[in-house]
C-alpha cells in the first residue's frame, strides 16, 4: 500500500511537470512566432485536468458512499461530461497550419506536448474509474461499461468538433444540443462524418487504453513480486 500511495503522488507530480513543460513550449513558440494565437491550448489543457481531478474525488467519495448514492452518481455524471475534453485535444492538430508561422516545427512540438498530456490525463482518469468498477463487478462487466464510456466520449468529441458544442453548453443550451443530436440520429445517412469521427476516436482511445490498463497491471504485479 505504501508503494501504491507513493507511486500515485509521483505520477501526480510527473503530470504537473509535463503540463508545465507544455506551457514552456507554448512560451517558446509564442516568442519565436511573435504572437499568442494558440493561447487557447492552455485553457484546453486546463479542461483536460478536470476529469482527472473528478475521478480522484470520486475515488475518495466511494470510500464512504455507495455508487448509487446521489453524491457519487452526480459526481460520475460530471466526470462523464468533462472526460471528452481530454481526448478532444487531438483534433487541435487541424489548427496547426491555419496561418503562416515562423517556426512550424516548434509549433508541432508544442501541439504534440499539449495533446499528449491531455490524452494521458484522460487515460489515467479512465483507469481510476475502471479500477473502482472492477472492485464492484466482474472483469467482463467493467470492460463493457468502460467501452460504453469510450463510445459516449467519442460521440461527444464529434459533437464538440463538428457541431461546435462544448461541455458548458450541456447546462446552458441543453435543448439546442438535443435538437442537433436527434437530427443526426434520425437521419444518420446524411451525416457520415458522425460515424467516422465517433468510431475513429473509439478505436484510437480503446487501443491505447487497453495498453495502458494491462501495462499498469503488469507493472503493479511485477512490483509486488519483488
Image: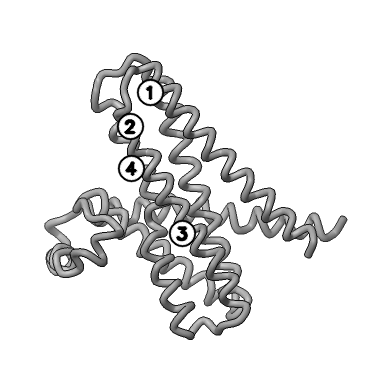
* Mark 3 vs 1, N-terminal side: 1
Q: Decide which of tag 4 and tag 2 comes sooner along the chain.
A: 2
Q: Which residue is mark 3?
A: 51
Q: Quadrant of residue 222?
A: bottom right
| Quarter residue 155 falls in | bottom left
Instruction: Where is residue 107? Give x, y as percent.
Output: 39, 25
- Residue beneath disc 2: 38
Identified at 52% across, 64% down, the residue is 55
Q: What whole-number distance in Å separates the C-alpha atoms at marks 4 and 2? A: 14 Å
In the image, 206 versus 60, the foreground residue is 60
Residue 176's image quarter?
A: bottom left
Which of labels 4 and 3 is toward the front?
A: 3
Q: Residue at x 52, y 77 (%)?
A: 141
Q: Residues within 10 Å of mark 3 (few under 14, many from 20)?
A: many
- The 10 Å Cα crowd at callout 2, few under 14, some 14 to 19, many 20 or more, is some
Say if mark 3 contacts mark 1, CB within 8 Å: no
- Point out which mark residue 30 bears: 1
Q: Position of residue 53 (x, y in %)?
A: 51, 59
Q: Are marks 1 and 2 in contact (CB under 8 Å)?
A: yes
- Left or right: 191 with respect to 2? left
Q: Earlier in the sequence, mark 1 or mark 2?
A: 1
Mark nearer the N terminus (2 vs 3): 2
- Front position among marks 4 and 2: 2
List the residue tagged with mark 4. 91
Alpha-carbon distance for marks 4 and 3? Answer: 18 Å
Look at 16% across and 55% down and name the residue there: 191
**Mark positioned earlier in the residue sequence (4 or 3):** 3
Amino acid at each position: 500500500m505504501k508503494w501504491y500511495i507513493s507511486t500515485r503522488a509521483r505520477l501526480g507530480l510527473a503530470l504537473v511537470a509535463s503540463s508545465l513543460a507544455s506551457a514552456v513550449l507554448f512560451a517558446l513558440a509564442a516568442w519565436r512566432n511573435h504572437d499568442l494565437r494558440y493561447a487557447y491550448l492552455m485553457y484546453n489543457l486546463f479542461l483536460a485536468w478536470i476529469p482527472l481531478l473528478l475521478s480522484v474525488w470520486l475515488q475518495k467519495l466511494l470510500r464512504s458512499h455507495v455508487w448509487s448514492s446521489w453524491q457519487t452518481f452526480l459526481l460520475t455524471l460530471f466526470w462523464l461530461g468533462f472526460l471528452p475534453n481530454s481526448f478532444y485535444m487531438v483534433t487541435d492538430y487541424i489548427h496547426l497550419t491555419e496561418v503562416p508561422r515562423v517556426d512550424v516545427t516548434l509549433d508541432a512540438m508544442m501541439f504534440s506536448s499539449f495533446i499528449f498530456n491531455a490524452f494521458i490525463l484522460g487515460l489515467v482518469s479512465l483507469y481510476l474509474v475502471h479500477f473502482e468498477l472492477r472492485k464492484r463487478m466482474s472483469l467482463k462487466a467493467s470492460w463493457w461499461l468502460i467501452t460504453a464510456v469510450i463510445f459516449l466520449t467519442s460521440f461527444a468529441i464529434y459533437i464538440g468538433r463538428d457541431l461546435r458544442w462544448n461541455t458548458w453548453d450541456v447546462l446552458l443550451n441543453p435543448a439546442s444540443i438535443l435538437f442537433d443530436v436527434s437530427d443526426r440520429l434520425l437521419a444518420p445517412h446524411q451525416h457520415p462524418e458522425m460515424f467516422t469521427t465517433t468510431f475513429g476516436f473509439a478505436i484510437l482511445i480503446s487501443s491505447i487504453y487497453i495498453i495502458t490498463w494491462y501495462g499498469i497491471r503488469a507493472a503493479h504485479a511485477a512490483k509486488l513480486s519483488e
